[in-house]
Image: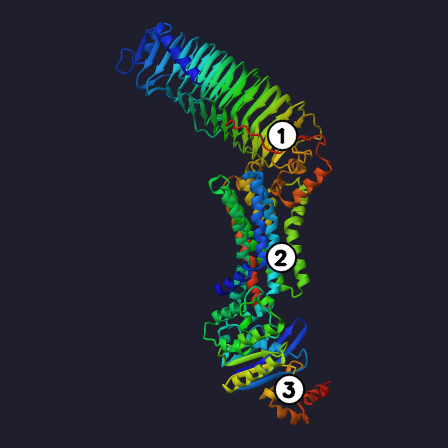
Amino acid sequence: MLKILKYSFADLARSRWSYVYFGFYLLLGFVLLFLNNDLSKAVITLMNVIVVLTPMIGTIFGIMYFYSAREFTELLLSQPIKRRDIFLGQYLGIALSLSLSLVVGLGIPFIIYGVAQSSEIWDFALLLLVGAFLTFIFVALSVNISLRNENKVKGFGYAILLWLFMAVIYDGLFLISLIMFDDYPLDKFTLFASMFNPIDLSRILVLLKLDISALLGYTGALFQNFFGNGSGMIISLLVLTLWAILPIGLLIRTAKRKDF
Amino acid sequence: MIRIENLYKRFGRLQVLEGVNFQIEEQGVVAVLGPNGSGKTTILKTILGMVLPQEGEIYFDNQPVLNNWDYRNRIGYMPQIARFPDNLTVRELIEMIKNIRDVDANEHALIERFGLESSMDKKLGQLSGGTKQKVNIVLTFMFDSPLLILDEPTAGLDPVSLIRLKALIQEEKEKGKTFLITTHIMSLVEELSDQIVFLLEGQIFFQGSVQELKDQTGQKNLEHSIAKILESDA
Amino acid sequence: MRGYLIGFLLLSIVTLLKGGIVEVCSRCEANTLQAAYDQASPFDTLLIKKGTYTTVGFEIRKPITIIGEVGAVLDGKGENYILKILSDEVHVFDLKLINAGRSYTKDYAAIYISRSSHFSIVRNTIIDPFFGVLIEKSHHGLIAENKVESDRIREDDSGNGVHAWHSSNLMIRGNELSGLRDGVYLEFVNESTVSGNNSHNNIRYGLHFMFSNHDKYLDNTFRENGAGVAVMFSKFIEMKRNRFVQNWGTASYGLLLKEIYDAEVVDNTFEENTIGIFIEGCTRVNYLSNDFKRNGWAIKVSGGSYTNVFSKNNFLSNSFDVSYNSKMNDNKFEGNYWSSYAGYDLDKNGVGDVPYRPVKLFSYVVNKTPETIILLRSLFVDIINFSERVSPVFTPDNLVDNAPAMKSFSYDQN
């Protein structure tokens, strides 16, 4: 598996798009920091960008790579390697190279700016962690889509739809249902519904750091427990991990049963 | 060497293989023939484990193939269309496959033979279809595999390379290798093959030598023999 | 600060000069406070040597100065008040007071001052009292550099650190108050100054005052109090250079202002509070040059607040800058710095060319359905906020900062 990982990583590491992605974060980091001169504001802007963009890029890269590597995958399949290793290797190759673009691209400007000596270091680290998580999750989801759809246009459409749903539509429906049913106790439903969208989950993780003052303004005991002590952080991270593991498992299962 | 027992394969509602049985014991070139959609590629791919049958079993050197992977160490496969990761160079690709197989390879002779030296450090994305096919040949033949599976090996090759490929197949055959080849070029079959497996409607319609096929159909020419089979079937 | 210290030294010297000294120690002639007090003439000084002295409901009815040496402890045995100051010109320095009484019916305090004037309570340490220093109907008093600490959890089980009632001209300065119900509590206290105190981790309010006019609150720090600071029904208040930090909770405010008229809130810092300032029924209050940093709601305005002015404040990375519960607005926001302002300044005059609307639609949604807070900073919420900003439907359309600053003001007051 490591061999496959190495090669698909090397392949992506030389792709123009990886550099565009890396360059984008590098530029974003510098612009945010050196134009504003406000680390805490930069972190907040960055959160908005990361929570929306990493899933989108993960989705698009994941699906594009697997469709374009289709024949190469077949070549690998004819070689003496386990299927699991081929797909896991390729998947990790994409997810790692994207995460690396993110972490290094943003890391350089922030370290130059001196984030390591500031109190924002943990917020920033959490932001990168969340970005990496989202990358792993959405690459896995999109690879699943590509494995289940031979038709590239259709697969691409589903993938974009998935992203759009998770990034915008889900929250819209969520908000509307909260407003509609606000006569009922909603805190359980709210926390529950947040768990079903990795983007929301990641956002909440960052909120726990950035907006804890506002979150603690809510009266419900469940919220208080969730936000007030470390349990919110731990539960969110666990569920996010689950969100990464399940699609990867499904990916391997699908790959094992698929004809090429 | 290969034994296929009662192989069934369905893609969705399309039944492709309906109880295929055959056995290849001796060395030499076996041409897998049949009309479009008769399941030629499917059979090759099930042998490679790329397509998973609904029913049936395949044995390679008396070992079951399904859910196994290490037997592929002894198979060289040349797919129909050669497409590789765009950002790797030819050299890296060859290194990678060698790295995966972890056995000795004689790629240099093949690279020379097909005139690929100048392309070694080019990225695969920049190569023409024909050159990619040559890379494909190198990857397939560079290991000392007892079984070679070639799916439409002539596609996209220029005449010079085609001659070189044919010579290569002859040489390897003389070294005692077994070939499974699908092709639409009947001259290639006549020239190279010792045995024909003819697939029709998901089953083996004929297995034997070129001569036997001609005799059976009463035609002098292979193309006509095949046409005859297809006509009588229709 | 230093001026005051010198003043006190002088005062002490004057009292020492004025009267004699009576020493109190276990082997002295006077081995209890009461014995020494009985010996002493007015304006004498009781010098308490190292040791623990049982002192239960000790009444002081003549002008006297009590000074504790290092290690001098008064033990109230948990029964009653410890010191009851019932005379003018009483000064208490450097004592440690422990085990004051605790009651659900009487307001026991470590130091109780009633109908006194020109008194001072300086550098005392009061451990786990019910009330720390309780002042009634007294004037011209100094309560400085004391430390009152407790670790109570329930409100009804605890009293206030410095509690003053119907008093005037008090100076409450440089005290550290923690773990109490309210750090400082003032009711009907006028012409007084509360400055440089550090009031933290109290169960209810760091500072709580009502019906107290013409008072100044300067340079205090209020940190992690259950409900922050509450200021109610008062006029002519001046609050400057205070810090309100990390007052978290459902009903927790950096500063709660209720029915306040003609006040100045200037140069304060509000950092990471659930609500920076909650304003209810306040009129003619000027909020100038304050820093609002990473609060849940920097400013929440509830009904009936008129002609308040918000100017030259920094609003930095708050979850919500301003929240209103009505569509009416009679307050002025002008020339503030808003970190979420995304406008431009083409004429380079330091003022944004596009007005800023500090009230977001989402803050209304959260007011109505609090659970929606979980969608804070989501793309969907950004989209509805944006559409509301383009054409206001729910938010007061005249609530606009027409001259948003392009750069944050640097005050560096802390």
Residue C336 numbered tag: 1
Residue C185 numbered tag: none
Whether B228 is drawn above or below C39: the answer is below
Q: Residue at x 50, y 24 (%)?
A: C220
For residue B215, what is the image quadrant?
bottom right
Tell me the chain of label 2: A
Pinpoint residue A203: horizontal percent, then vertical percent.
Answer: 58, 45
Q: Which residue is mark 2?
A: A60
Name which residue type carries label 3.
Ser
How dense is the environment of label 2, judged by Cα within 10 Å: few (below 14), some, or many (20 and up)?
A: some
Same subunit: marks 2 and 3: no
State how far apart marks 1 and 2 are (Cα): 42 Å
Which of A119 and C211 lies nearest the eye of the viewer? Answer: A119
Does residue A161 show up? yes
> Split into 4 quadrants, where in the image is the N terminus of chain C?
top left
Which of B74 and B7 lies nearest the eye of the viewer? Answer: B74
Which of C122 and C267 lies nearest the eye of the viewer? Answer: C267
Name which residue type carries label 2.
Ile
Q: Of circles 1 and 2, which is in front?
A: 1
Q: Residue furthest front?
A: B118
Which of C65 and C377 lies nearest the eye of the viewer? Answer: C377
Of helix, strand and loop, which one carries label 2? helix
Q: Which residue is mark 3?
A: B187
Of helix, strand and loop, which one carries label 3? helix
Same subunit: marks 1 and 3: no
In-image side of C385 versus C212 (left or right): right
How dense is the environment of label 1, judged by Cα within 10 Å: few (below 14), some, or many (20 and up)?
A: many
In-image side of C180 versus C27 (left or right): right
State how far apart marks 1 and 3 are (Cα): 87 Å
